[in-house]
Amino acid sequence: MGNLVLITGGGRSGKSSYAQGLAEALGGRFQ
């Protein structure tokens, strides 16, 4: 699962995408 977040975050832009991808991967718990 960690790889998916890395690919989603690194493939887009930088930290913003990484944080968003992680939040979506967790089910939007950060937001």
Image (tube, rainbow, N blue to C red):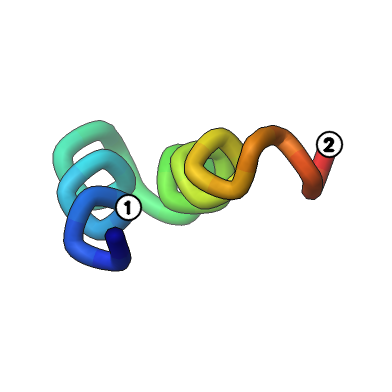
| Cβ–Cβ under 8 Å for marks 2 and 1 | no
Query: x, y percentage for residue 10?
Result: 22, 50
28 or 14: which is nearer to us?
Answer: 28
Hey, what amino acid is under mark 2? Gln
Mark 1 = which residue? 5
Residue 9 position, x and y percent, is: 32, 47
Which residue carries the number 2 mark? 31
Crowd band around label 1 with a 10 angstrom C-alpha radius: few (<14), some (14–19), many (20+) = many
Residue drawn at x 46%, y 40% is 21
The quadrant of the rendering that contains the N terminus is bottom left
Label 2 sits on a secondary structure element that is loop
Give the secondary structure at mark 1.
helix
Q: Earlier in the sequence, mark 2 or mark 1?
A: 1
Q: Residue at x 47, y 54 (%)?
A: 15
Q: Mark 2 and mark 1: span between their CA atoms?
A: 16 Å
The amino acid sitting under disc 1 is: Val
The circle drawn on residue 14 is none
